[in-house]
Image (cartoon, rainbow, N blue to C red):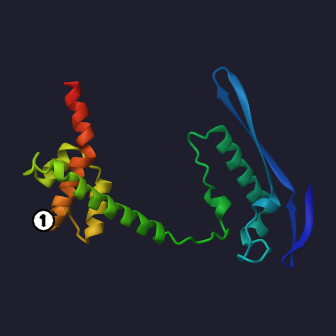
Amino acid sequence: DTVNTTLGGVNISYPEWCKVTVKKLVGNNIVEFTAKEYWLENYATIKKDHNAPNAMWLKRPFGQLAKCAEAQALRKAFPEIITQQPTAEEMEGKFIEEKDVTPQAEVEKQDFCTKLDNTLSEQSRFKEVNQGDDLNDLILTHNVPSETIDKWCTQFGIDKIEDLPEEKKQNCIDYIKKEYQQVVTLEELGE
């Protein structure tokens, strides 16, 4: 049914809901995936703390809701292809609470530093073994992920791993030896 009402001082006519069914061939059977979306639960407002619909939802109330229902039905039918994240059409004009992620980044940075420090103290028993190993050789030998190398560079304020000061290189070498010691041991057992 079409609803006629006033939202935020704006007169609008919109569909109460929209239902879309997607049919998918699963094995030899046709399976239906249905999504029913309500306009009031989906429409975007002109401002964060205002309930008047934005220009697109005011201009195309039926079309916008149909897009949302279709996207939801497709998500149900093809979860392996379509993510659970809203589509651009669904998010258009919606206000997203901004979240400061810096504290989490700082926590990760501190965790990384702590891990390196702990590695240094725990590595004293491994110092005799492979003392002369080169950092680049260890990185290549153990396929150290680029994300780890990027963290090191960011942590120590450098652009490339070759620019690490000697004492920091040793920290990284010790970290690799500790982190990949179990892998080496398992490989040796397999031989």
- The answer to whether residue 91 is left or right of residue 137 is right
Q: Which amino acid does label 1 sit on?
A: Glu
Task: Please count the marks in the image.
Answer: 1
State the residue lying farthest toward the top: 28
Helix, strand or loop for disc 1: helix
| Residue 114: x %, y % from top left | 33, 62
For the C terminus, which image quadrant? top left
**74 to 50, vertically: above or below:** above
**103 to 126, vertically: above or below:** below
- The answer to whether residue 11 is left or right of residue 49 is right
Quickly name the residue at label 1.
166
- The answer to whether residue 67 is left or right of residue 156 is right
For the N terminus, which image quadrant? bottom right
59 or 52: which is nearer to us? 52
167 or 38: which is nearer to us? 167
| Residue 144: x %, y % from top left | 26, 49
- The answer to whether residue 86 is left or right of residue 155 is right
Identity of the residue drawn at 76% across and 56% down: 65
Identity of the residue drawn at 74% across and 50% down: 69
| Residue 148: x %, y % from top left | 30, 55
**78 to 157, vertically: above or below:** above
Identity of the residue drawn at 82% across and 62% down: 40
Badge 1 crowding class, 10 Å Cα cut-off, few under 14, some 14 to 19, many 20 or more, is few
Residue 174 falls in which quadrant of the image? Answer: bottom left
